[in-house]
């Protein structure tokens, strides 16, 4: 009887405490833990050994003195199990370079050698394979419910293979990485990148990537601008990766023109210069041309042109209508790939 | 036994009820984050490599001065901006506050249409630890997506500190919401989508230009003090901060006691306001003053010519002093000293009740050509009340030779409107 009374008053007390701060802090803590616990069995540690990389030249050692700015040659990272048969998605950044060995530690502590099956460097995605069966996978998060402001958690596996790293945040923007992913303010760094981004129910939103984008992570310091390739895009990519797709390059369509912003041109997009070796140069666009139409659509601004390029794929042949002096020309130009 | 079971049941119900309630609270919280994100995204303005936010249905919007200065003074009237729905507009520069790092611009809505906008919140009512949302275009990530919309980046954080003194950002809000290059000029809002600041700075080291968890925003209440003057176009599209001339403060640490007046220069605003050496300034308007920096911080949120009320402790007594702020001579956010226009009117003036009285008109001067006479009481300049001799002189100094100014003058029983074309100061 006495024990029960104590229990009862303890329950009351905890309710009172929860109400004291609106209960929000407690419920957020709990939700993040719950999400991470659900994700945990499918998050693996990835150990990569590779030949040493050249230190980047910083110009001034004062800038980086004592600061860890480069992925170590033997690097611990994270990965996400995507099917029962041992396929694991990680960030391509984790497994590029002159790799000697890749080992994976599962949540149960078992340690396996992994093979790099395929990758797409533009999406920063790599597929690993270990010998296993019946591995736990995550339920996908319904993409339609993903809004800016939706709470998410970036889950990584600690280097010892046992603990998790949990970095909560929100969805900052959709339609990033050329439409292949989302942006989040959850902090990502060398180590947790390659792990899953999950929603508050622990369902898979995507796999974190692009931790090494120079402008967004200066000298290895995360800026609060992080990315993940979403699960629907990964699913689309998986069959090719399983077949051994090894794609280098950004994967983004590219015309190769520089827009002149300082003219009074009322109509079209005036071109200041063309990128050497780009498709515009090969296709015959010249500095001073004014692009009037791209693929049959009027280009009233540079943004129209940019949107037109981004909607197409590398290799697409696009009709470009332009004005050169008094002449109106129509060229057909195959799109190239944006350089890295 | 029955009692025992009931008690156990009650405990279980409480525990379960509490877990469900916690889930609801979390969902309610994130619903607020999502709703605010959407509202602010709709009112967001992309310009150059920076950010901006609409504050009215008819198209007034704010950004940072340093965003506009980056675009270049030659193109202020041709600044192309884009809204998140993908529509582009040409913005007109209306006025800029180069010290407070705020610029006011305007776009015109299509006939019969209005723009989405965010309402002002009260930045003085923020609390440390309160959730805030920063919206911006860090690293210029946004562009037309497949659906032709532009998506700014939204980050969630808390108010880390209030009333930070960071030179020109004299009373700023510190936040850990991720703010990066490109966020400049973008809004910091509460979960009710109320504008409480304009993000403009981040604390960095080793030239590492990414967010460190320490970002600074100009508080909305400061912006509110400047907005009426800015909407009128300021003085040649510029607006100026205030200071009390002739007031020298003790730079030593005063352990939160206040700001100590170490000297009052003769014939200055400080002397006229009645400051005395040894006074301890403890309040400016409603804000408690704890140090010299806090005094500069609070004064820094007002434009020149604002009348402020200062409470000082003088021995056992307390005195309330009124001072009309002079123009601040501090460097602006781009590190530039104040630029005067170098214009010349050619009068001597004296402070009088209701304006400034002309005591001398220089022969051949713009004043003489315009018809000003000794004994005239100048009560208004360019639509602004002449509060003192200094007010009129400042407004002349800030103009360029060749500029026209409008003076309202009382002569005898008459009120005259006088147009003068300013000359060049030799």
Image: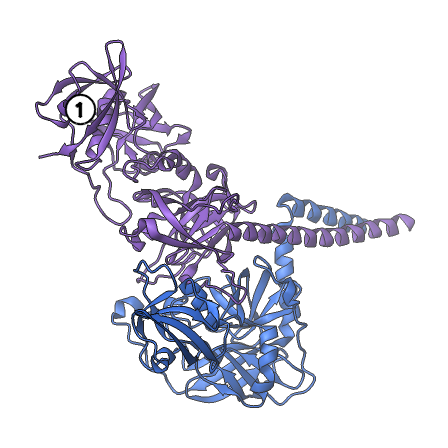
Which one is nearer the viewer's eye here, A37 or A311?
A: A311
What shade has chain B been given?
purple
Give the residue number, with chain letter if any, for mark 1.
Answer: B370
Q: Position of residue A43 (x, y in %)?
A: 60, 75
Question: What residue lies at 58% left-to-right and 52% top-to-bottom?
Answer: B33
What shade has chain A been given?
blue
Quarter location, residue A214 = bottom left
Mark yes or no: residue A339 visible.
yes
B9 left or right, relative to B62: right
Mark yes or no: residue A1 visible.
no
Q: Position of residue A79 (x, y in %)?
A: 55, 78
B84 left or right, relative to A204: left
Instruction: Note whether B270 is above or below A319 in the view shown.
Output: above
Which residue ends up furthest to the front in the rendered image?
A: A326
Q: Position of residue B164 (x, y in %)?
A: 38, 44
Residue at mark 1: chain: B
Instruction: Note whether A307 is above or below B255 in the view shown.
Output: below
Q: Position of residue B390 (x, y in %)?
A: 22, 26
Mark 1 surroundings: few (<14), some (14-19) or many (≥20) residues within 10 A: some
Question: What residue lies at 27% left-to-right and 33% top-to-bottom?
Answer: B243
Which one is nearer the viewer's eye here, A201 or B110?
A: B110
Q: Secondary structure at mark 1?
A: helix
| Image quadrant in which the C terminus of chain B is located | top left
Give the colouring mode of the picture.
by chain
B419 left or right, relative to B39: left
Please state the total of marks drawn on the protein image.
1
Which residue ends up furthest to the right in the rendered image?
A: B2
Question: What residue lies at 20% left-to-right and 16% top-to-bottom?
Answer: B376
Which one is nearer the viewer's eye here, B2 or B287?
A: B287
Instruction: Note whether A189 is above or below B229 in the view shown.
Output: below
């Amino acid at each position: 009887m006495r024990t029960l009374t104590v229990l009862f008053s303890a329950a009351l007390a905890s309710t009172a405490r929860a109400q004291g701060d609106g209960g929000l802090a407690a419920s957020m803590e709990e939700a993040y833990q719950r999400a991470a616990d659900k994700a945990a069995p499918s998050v693996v540690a990835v150990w990569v050994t590779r030949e040493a990389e050249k230190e980047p030249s910083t110009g001034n050692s004062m800038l980086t003195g004592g600061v860890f700015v480069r992925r170590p040659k033997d690097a611990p990272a994270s990965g996400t199990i995507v099917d029962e048969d041992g396929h694991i998605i990680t960030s391509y950044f984790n497994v590029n370079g002159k790799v000697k060995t890749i080992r994976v530690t599962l949540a149960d502590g078992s340690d396996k050698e992994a093979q790099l099956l395929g990758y797409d460097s533009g999406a920063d995605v790599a597929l690993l394979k270990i010998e296993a069966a019946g591995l736990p996978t995550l339920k996908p998060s319904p993409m339609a419910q993903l809004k800016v402001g939706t709470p998410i958690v970036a889950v990584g596996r600690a280097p010892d293979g046992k603990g998790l790293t949990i970095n909560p945040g929100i969805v900052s923007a959709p339609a990033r990485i050329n439409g292949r992913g989302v942006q989040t303010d959850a902090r990502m760094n060398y180590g947790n990148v390659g792990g899953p981004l999950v929603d508050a129910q622990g369902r898979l939103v995507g796999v974190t990537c692009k931790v090494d984008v120079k402008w967004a992570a200066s000298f290895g310091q995360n800026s609060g601008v992080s990315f993940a390739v979403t699960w629907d895009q990964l699913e689309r990519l998986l069959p090719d990766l399983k077949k051994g797709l090894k794609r280098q390059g950004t994967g983004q369509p590219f015309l190769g023109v520089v827009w002149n912003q300082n003219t009074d041109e009322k109509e079209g997009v005036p071109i200041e210069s063309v990128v050497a070796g780009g498709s515009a140069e090969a296709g015959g666009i010249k500095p001073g041309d004014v692009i009037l139409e791209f693929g049959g659509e009027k280009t009233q601004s540079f943004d129209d042109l940019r949107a037109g390029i981004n909607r197409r794929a590398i290799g697409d042949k696009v009709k470009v209508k332009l004005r050169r002096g008094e002449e109106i020309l129509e060229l057909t130009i195959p799109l190239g790939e944006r350089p890295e | 036994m029955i009692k025992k079971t009931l008690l156990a049941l009650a405990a279980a119900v409480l525990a379960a009820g509490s877990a469900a309630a916690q889930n609801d609270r979390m969902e309610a919280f994130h619903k607020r984050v999502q709703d605010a994100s959407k509202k602010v995204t709709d009112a967001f303005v992309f310009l150059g490599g920076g950010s901006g936010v609409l504050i009215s249905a008819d198209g007034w919007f704010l950004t940072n001065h340093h965003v506009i200065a980056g675009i270049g003074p030659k193109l202020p009237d041709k600044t192309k901006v884009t809204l998140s729905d993908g529509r582009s507009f040409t913005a007109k520069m209306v006025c800029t506050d180069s010290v407070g790092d705020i610029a006011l611009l305007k776009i015109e809505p299509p006939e019969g249409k209005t723009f989405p906008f965010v309402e002002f919140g009260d930045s003085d009512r923020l609390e440390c630890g309160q959730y805030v949302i920063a919206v911006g275009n860090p690293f210029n990530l946004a562009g037309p997506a497949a659906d032709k919309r532009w998506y700014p980046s939204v980050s969630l954080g808390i108010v880390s500190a209030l009333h930070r003194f960071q030179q020109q950002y004299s009373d700023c809000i510190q936040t850990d919401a991720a703010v990066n290059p490109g966020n400049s000029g973008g809004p910091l809002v509460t979960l009710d989508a109320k504008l409480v600041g304009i993000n403009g700075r981040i604390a960095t080291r080793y030239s590492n230009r990414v967010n460190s968890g320490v970002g600074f925003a100009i508080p909305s209440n400061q912006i509110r003090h400047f907005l009426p003057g800015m909407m009128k176009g300021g003085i040649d599209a510029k607006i100026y901060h205030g200071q009390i001339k002739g007031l020298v403060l003790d730079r030593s640490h005063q352990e939160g006691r206040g700001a100590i007046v170490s000297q009052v220069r003769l014939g200055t605003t400080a002397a006229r306001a009645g400051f005395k050496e040894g006074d301890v300034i403890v309040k400016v308007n409603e804000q408690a003053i704890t140090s010299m920096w806090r005094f500069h911080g609070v004064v820094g949120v007002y434009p020149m010519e604002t009348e402020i009320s200062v409470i000082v402790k003088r021995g056992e007594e307390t005195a309330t002093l009124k001072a009309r702020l002079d123009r601040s001579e501090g460097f602006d956010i781009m590190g530039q000293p104040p630029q005067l226009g170098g214009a010349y009117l050619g009068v001597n003036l004296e402070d009088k009740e209701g304006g400034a009285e002309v005591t001398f008109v220089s022969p051949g001067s713009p004043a003489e050509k315009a018809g000003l006479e000794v004994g005239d009481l100048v009560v208004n300049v360019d639509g602004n009340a002449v509060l003192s001799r200094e007010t009129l002189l400042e407004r002349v100094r800030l103009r360029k030779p060749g500029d026209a100014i409008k003076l309202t003058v009382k002569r005898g029983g008459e009120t005259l409107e006088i147009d003068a074309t300013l000359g060049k100061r030799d």
